[in-house]
Amino acid sequence: MNEQPASAASQVLQSVRWAGNALDLLDQRLLPERIVYLKLRTPQDVWEAIRELKVRGAPAIGIAAAYGVVLGIQGFEGDSEAAAAEAVRHAEYLATSRPTAVNLFWALDRMKATARRLAGSGVAGAAIYDSLLEEAQRIQAEDEETNRLIGENALTLFQDGMGVLTHCNAGGLATSKYGTALAPFYLALERGIHLKVYADETRPVLQGARLTAFELHQAGVDVTLITDNMAGHVMSKGWVQAVIVGTDRVAANGDVANKIGTYSVAVLAKAHNIPFYVACPMSTIDLSTPTGADIPIEERHPDEVTQGFGRRTAPEGVAVYNPAFDVTPHELVTAIITEKGIVRAPYDTGLRQLFEQ
Ligand code: MRU
């Protein structure tokens, strides 16, 4: 464990860092109070870190899981067939950590494909380790480049002086850098374009307060934190000209799963005639999931709702429903912004065409 003073974070922290033979992972549960990097050495460590939200955000969990596969075959002694089978076994285990974000399965599929390509090729098991490490590092590096392009595309939709509301954390902390929904804010800052960001607190785990407000504030972006139930009020005042959020999975028809509460924000945006944008890499679009109703929605422990603030805020034994995500139907989505371009309705054809490009 490596702890830095919270005041030392003058720029957005890297959530996942490969450290030679281990994975250094920023423990996002402790932010913003403490900046602690954990050293993960096994696929089990990575599985737990994903499940317990030490690392979270669709692209970041995919990257962490990819390194988890690498850790699983570190020091493995055996031929390429055996090493590849071992890597696939670890990938399948890591895929059970969380169900909703498709980037997790996408990254693990890439790792499995890399392992299978080399199986039976006669190379030593150690060569498979090197190739898997390279693939994990490629996934991480590509994510940074992708997010910058998403930011460029998103920025074409915003003008100087606009108020923009966001929900949850789709920032640098949720990715390798820049984020998806937060990428245009970083690019705007670099270019002297002023955007006023409203960050929803995002109950129950407070990714908006603990992470989005933290990273944007550290970077010098003009960010104002509001509780989730203030979004309608802020919109009614005329302070918000656009909403932008990330997503964990986009279905083939354009329905979008994202952090619980996103759907309510989309309904509010519609009621106030405010465009509702979704920003994501192509790896978040899952054409094999026909509609939002087919997206598995994770349910989490009731304690997140009843004692999420470190003290009990609800009666012992009360029934709790705690879905981590909701689905925003495509009718409420103004546009989906990817690294390849901006898609508008009809999404079924638009998304398919994006893949064919
Ligand atoms: O439960 P979390 O914190 O992993 O949920 C994260 C979100 O819902 C993000 O908005 C989404 O993963 C997009 S991150 C670029």
Image: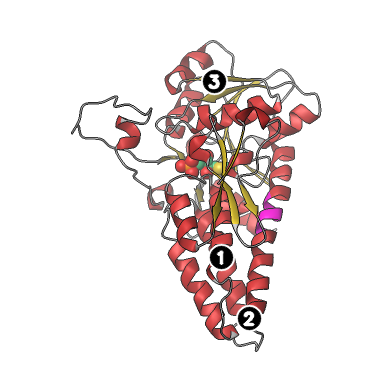
Q: Secondary structure at mark 3?
A: strand
Choose the circle earlier in sequence order: 1 or 3.
1
Choose the circle earlier in sequence order: 3 or 2.
2
Local crowd size for mark 2, using a 10 Å CA cut-off: few (<14), some (14–19), many (≥20): some
Seen from the viewer's position, the closer of residues 354 and 138 is 138
The answer as to whether callout 3 falls within 8 Å of ligand 1 is: no
Circles 1 and 2: CB atoms closer than 8 Å: no
Choose the circle earlier in sequence order: 1 or 2.
1
Asked if residue 216 is positioned above or below residue 181 in the image, the reply reads above
Seen from the viewer's position, the closer of residues 287 and 133 is 133
Q: Is residue 141 magenta?
A: yes
Q: Amino acid at mark 3?
A: Leu
Image x and y of residue 333, in percent: 53, 36
Residue 38 visible somewhere in the drawing: yes
**Tag nearer the camera, 1 or 3:** 1
Local crowd size for mark 1, using a 10 Å CA cut-off: few (<14), some (14–19), many (≥20): many
- Using residue 221 as the reference point, say whether residue 80 is left or right of it: left
Mark drawn on residue 118: 2
Mark drawn on residue 71: 1
Q: Residue at x 67, y 32 (%)?
A: 9
Alpha carbon of mark 1 to alpha carbon of mark 2: how far? 18 Å
- Using residue 172 as the reference point, say whether residue 315 is left or right of it: left
**Tag nearer the camera, 1 or 2:** 1
Q: Residue at x 54, y 22 (%)?
A: 273
Looking at the rendering, in which quadrant would you find the C terminus? bottom right
Mark drawn on residue 225: 3
Q: Amino acid at mark 1?
A: Leu
Seen from the viewer's position, the closer of residues 107 and 296 is 107
Image x and y of residue 323, in percent: 35, 40
Q: What's the magenta region?
A: 139-143
